[in-house]
Image (cartoon, rainbow, N blue to C red):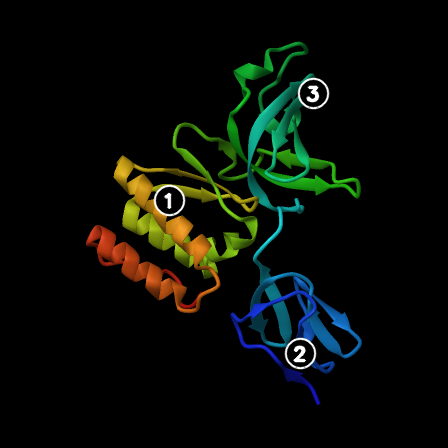
Amino acid sequence: MSKILIKDKDIAVPGEVLAEGMDYLPGNGTYRDQEKIRAERLGLAQIEGRAIKLILLSGKYLPKRGDTIIGKVEQIIMSGWMLDTNSAYSAMLGMKDATSEFIPKGADLTQYFNFGDYIVCKITNVTSQKLVDVTLRGPGLRKLRNGRIIEVNTNKVPRIIGKKGSMVSMIKQATDCNIIVGQNGIIWLQGKEPEMEFLAIDAIKKIESESHLSGLTDKMKEFLEKATGKKISVAAAGE
């Protein structure tokens, strides 16, 4: 007889049996061991119908095709720019993926992106050798100007974003900050007032440290309303 042995949002440790029987399917962060589903890493259990997956609570970012990340220019070569992806692997931004302009041979590439610039880009390919290619061709992909950069645990990014963007929408609404959350754990934000930027950072760090707790959306709503005096609406129900 199939049964689930863990509750939604419980913390699971590596090797822990989460479910028994063939009626349930292993999702991200879990694996099948004969008729059991076990946790692969430390994580927060998430039960979605028949699928059981984990929101991982530890580990570095692993680049995946289709991810939108914030990269930092760390090297300039003849064919483009190498980006720090906040992982063990750098990404290559080629000239044809960086701009629609024609870049003549021998051009000064620092005129486009210089050392230390932060760029919102999308991963287009990851080879088996973990060679990563990115592009700036797409809506919202661009060089970031001014603002503040913070780093969070990459495994907490789904909680910071929230279901259908509910968490980050609340922070934007409360602080009137522009916020971009890279799936590699790098976050850019820019507000009209420094104190609102600091509040947004406090809120993000609070979600990061309390991501394992239930009822976090309501707690964050209360925190932001108390700090700003505003009435905050939740963009999407649930967490």
Reading the image, the residue beneath label 1 is: 201
Q: Residue at x 71, y 73 (%)?
A: 37
The C terminus sits in image quarter: bottom left
Q: At label 2, which amino acid type do we have?
A: Ala
**Label ID, residue 19:** 2
Q: Earlier in the sequence, mark 1 or mark 2?
A: 2
Q: At label 1, which amino acid type do we have?
A: Ile
Q: In the image, 223: left or right of 74? A: left
Q: Relative to 204, is 143 above or below?
A: above
From the image, state whether disc 3 or disc 2 is nearer to you.
Answer: 2
Q: In the image, 160: left or right of 101? A: left
Seen as rendered, the residue at the extreme top is: 106
Cα separation, mark 3 vs mark 2, equals 50 Å
Q: Residues within 10 Å of mark 2 (few under 14, many from 20)?
A: many
Q: Earlier in the sequence, mark 1 or mark 3?
A: 3
Q: Relative to 216, is 90 above or below?
A: above
Reading the image, the residue beneath label 3 is: 79
Q: Secondary structure at mark 2?
A: strand
**Label ID, residue 88:** none
Cα separation, mark 1 vs mark 2, equals 37 Å
Q: At label 3, which amino acid type do we have?
A: Ser
Residue 219, horizontal then vertical, whole percent: 34, 63
Q: Are marks 3 and 2 in contact (CB under 8 Å)?
A: no
| Residue 40: quarter of image | bottom right
Cα separation, mark 1 vs mark 3, equals 36 Å
In this view of the protein, can residue 192 be seen by the observer?
no
Residue 155, horizontal then vertical, whole percent: 56, 53
Q: Secondary structure at mark 1?
A: helix
Residue 208, horizontal then vertical, whole percent: 46, 53
Seen as rendered, the residue at the extreme left is: 229
Q: Residue at x 77, y 73 (%)?
A: 33
